[in-house]
Amino acid sequence: MTQNKTYIHDYITIQNNEIVLNGTSVFKIEPTDFGDFSKQAYRNFDIQYPKFFKMDALSKLAFLGSELLLSPITSLETENNIALVLANKSSSLDTDVKYQESISDKENYFPSPAVFVYTLPNICLGEISIRHQLKSENSFFIFDAFNTEFMSNYSDILLNTNKADIVLCGWVEFFNDNYKAFLCTISKEESAKYKNENINTLYNK
Amino acid sequence: MIREVYITETNCITPLGFDVQSNVEAILLGDSGIQLHNDISLMPNSFYASIISNEKINSAFEKISTETKYSRLEKMMILALEPIIKNSGVELNSKTTFILSTTKGNITALKDASGDNFNNAHLDVLARNVADFFGFKTQPIVVSNACVSGILAVSVAKRMIQSELYDNIFVVAGDEVSEFVLSGFNSFQAMSDLPCKPYSKNRTGVSLGEATAAVLLSANPATAKIKVIGDSSINDANHISGPSRTGEGLFRSIQNALKESQIDGNKLDFISAHGTATPFNDEMEAIALNRLSLQNVPINSLKGFYGHTLGASGLLETVIAIESVNQNMLFESKGFDEIGVSESINVIEKNEERNIDYFLKTASGFGGCNTAVVFEKVKHELH
């Protein structure tokens, strides 16, 4: 396989009530829960997408990160071959636990399809795909910690086999109001921005 | 030159049998694993599903290990992997890795979610437990992409072997029938009152099932059963819980997989499709296949034999399809009677002998995901 060099173009980190884009803090508020944080972030960036409020927390987290990275580089009028390669530790367990509660008590048995559908980690990939009209490769992986080696190798494979022009790669972890998202865009197009950095160093910044 | 990738070992654990041969024998006889169950710990009402008996799992597991710490699903996964790891003789070194694919893993651990039990609901813990049983040296990779997980794992493994990161990758896929999943599909009103009837006029939804399947993907052609020649996994970008009405993601996945395979669609000898028997899924598949002019290619869904085994389905159905190729036999699409999709497709009604060189495997799932993989018969040359 031809191994072309690939480059990180932009990256974003969301954690501790703050959003950092390419190393610069772009949104920060006083400590609050994720529901409130995500709502305020949505308003701050003037996002117009009411479906956001129907999403579970994991999808909201992935959506916010991808919104800031993809909106400047995508258009609904053209095809965007941007693959989505995301991973986390807790899968959809935050919503799984809520769904399990809805069926555990037989006196109060109320399984809801609107909750059940979010008991899959890859639903957040679907949400991002719908938002940016990405008819592209997507896969969700689970690791005990962000496996930057695998994620970067797999992204390079998609780029080098021309299965994608750009890969949105990253980690979106949410459980019990603890969260961290790290997303970056990678492509074969040369960029001098992060010459001495890789996914691992940027993730740990 | 990109290196070629083969499947060299296969196995499956299902209600129809605990090895490939017994499964194929049952399919040839027309047996189905789907039965009526009355179990209020799983569902308030009676339901049709394809469930493996606990006694069978435990007695088979006792033959390979005396360890009691494993969950039911972990035992099923270990049982699927054990003979193929042994038989392959592949060394579990840094060039061999392990991919586990599942939709819900040990979700039953949430029923009593105290301490350790809750930890077991984590998919990385499930993968670690299974990997450590065999002593894999590399970190396990978990693919959890709804109902395409099992076949997507084949595609991920193929790509990693092509890129020379690994020489051998063991892939296991598995899911259980649980109260969690039954109640969820039921809340979508997606469950069939009778054993499911893929592509049929009177289909009313899925029958759920459980299974594990395992394969070895390898760069070494020596004992190859089949070659993996093209793959793609494209999102519909349309709806999170319903398939695209135009079949866009499936259409593109198949188109890309055929392009990479460098074969025309008319070379395909059959399609092992998803065919869940929900009204929308089967209709979507028929539309996508017609857009690709594949409506005359013989097609089956094995859901009538196994029910919908979620993340396991794509890999289980691939394992059975490989037997189709090697026995030159098209397997019937059980449960089918009268065509019930708006655009015609060529559903296999009876087992039929046929030379098979190429087949396509497809799957689709929640989140708008789709996967298509093309396989080619290996012609072993005599030296």
Image (cartoon, helix red, strand yellow):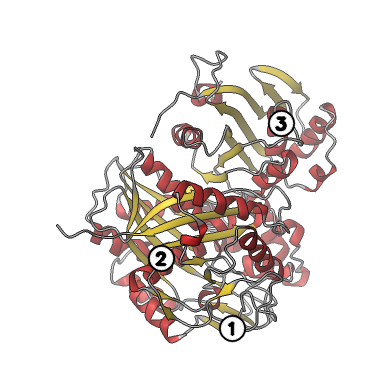
Chain that bears disc 1: B
Corner quadrant of residue B48: bottom right
- Residue B37's mark? 1
Label 3 in the same subunit as label 2? no
Q: Position of residue B290 (x, y in %)?
A: 64, 63
Q: Earlier in the sequence, mark 2 or mark 1?
A: 1
Q: Where B102 sits versus B207, above or below?
A: above
- Which mark is nearer the camera, 3 or 2? 3
- The circle drawn on residue A74 is 3
Look at the numbered discs 2 and 1 and tell me whether their residues touch, using CB distance below 8 Å: no
Asked if badges 1 and 3 are on one and the same chain, I answer no
Q: Position of residue B376 (x, y in %)?
A: 38, 58
Other-residue count near label 3 (Cα within 10 Å), few / some / many at <14 / 14–19 / ≥20:
some
Which amino acid type is shown beneath numbered disc 2? Val
Identity of the residue drawn at 51% across and 70% down: B210
Classify B235 as above or below A168.
below
Mark 2, other Cα within 10 Å: few <14 / some 14–19 / many ≥20: many
What kind of element bears circle 3?
loop
Tell us which disc is closer to us: 1 or 3. Answer: 3
- Front-most of residues A69 and B253: B253
Provide the residue designation for mark 2: B319
